[in-house]
Image (cartoon, rainbow, N blue to C red):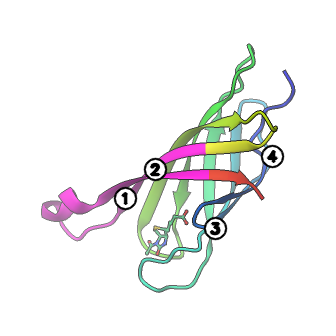
C-alpha cells in the first residue's frame, strides 16, 4: 500500500500545531508540539514528542501513540493515542484521545492529577 505515514504538519481544533518528522521503518517517529493553550497563562512553547505508528501490511489506516513532554511549561506529560483516517475526498484526519498527567504535590492529590480528552488533527 502507498506510504500511510504520519510525517508532516498537523493542526487540531484548538489551532495547536504538531510537526511529525520522518517515520522510521519500524514506525517510530519524533517531532514537536506547539500548543496554543496555556493553562497558567504562560506563553506558547514547542514541546518534544515521541511516538510510534503501525504500518499494517494489509493496508488499512494505521493506529499510533505518542507522548508530549511539556518541558517548558511544568512537570506534565500527555499520552495521545489514535488512528489515521482518510475521507472520500482524500482528506486525512487523526482522531485521538489523550491523558494529561500534571504533577501534584502529594499522593493524597493523585486523584485529580489526570485529565482525559479528545483531539482531531487535519493536515496543515
Ligand atoms: C502548564 C502546563 O503544563 N501546560 C500548559 O499550560 N499547556 C500545556 C498543555 C496544553 C495542551 C492543550 C491541548 C492542545 O494544545 O492541543 S497541558 C500541559 C501544558
Q: Residue 98's mark?
A: 2
- Identify the mark nearer the N-term, 3 or 4: 3
The quadrant of the picture occupied by the C terminus is: bottom right
For label 3, the SS is loop
Label 2: how many Cα within 10 Å (few below 14, some 14–19, many 20+):
some
**Circle 1 residue:** 101
Label 1: how many Cα within 10 Å (few below 14, some 14–19, many 20+):
some
**Circle 3 residue:** 15
* Residue 52 % position (x, y): 63, 38
The furthest residue to the right: 2
Above/below status of 51 relative to 71: above
Disc 3, disc 1: CB below 8 Å? no
For label 2, the SS is strand
Above/below status of 74 relative to 42: above
Q: Residue 22's mark?
A: 4
* Residue 54 % position (x, y): 66, 28
Q: CA distance from mark 2 to mark 1?
A: 10 Å
* Residue 64 % position (x, y): 60, 37
Q: CA distance from mark 3 to mark 2?
A: 16 Å
Disc 1, disc 4: CB below 8 Å? no
For label 1, the SS is strand
Disc 4, disc 2: CB below 8 Å? no
Q: Quadrant of residue 11?
A: bottom right
User: Position of 90 compared to 47: left or right?
Assistant: right
Amino acid at each position: 500500500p502507498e506510504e500511510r505515514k504520519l510525517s508532516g504538519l498537523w493542526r487540531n481544533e484548538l489551532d495547536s500545531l504538531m510537526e511529525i518528522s520522518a517515520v522510521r521503518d519500524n514506525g517510530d517517529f519524533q517531532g514537536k508540539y506547539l500548543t496554543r493553550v496555556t493553562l497558567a497563562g504562560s506563553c506558547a512553547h514547542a514541546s518534544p514528542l515521541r511516538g510510534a505508528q503501525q504500518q499494517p501490511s494489509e493496508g488499512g489506516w494505521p493506529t499510533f501513540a505518542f507522548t508530549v513532554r511539556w518541558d517548558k511549561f511544568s512537570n506534565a506529560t500527555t499520552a495521545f493515542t489514535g488512528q489515521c483516517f482518510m475521507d472520500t475526498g482524500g482528506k486525512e484526519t487523526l482522531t485521538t484521545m489523550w491523558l494529561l498527567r500534571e504533577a501534584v504535590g502529594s499522593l493524597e492529590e493523585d486523584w485529580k492529577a489526570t485529565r482525559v480528552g479528545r483531539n482531531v488533527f487535519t493536515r496543515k
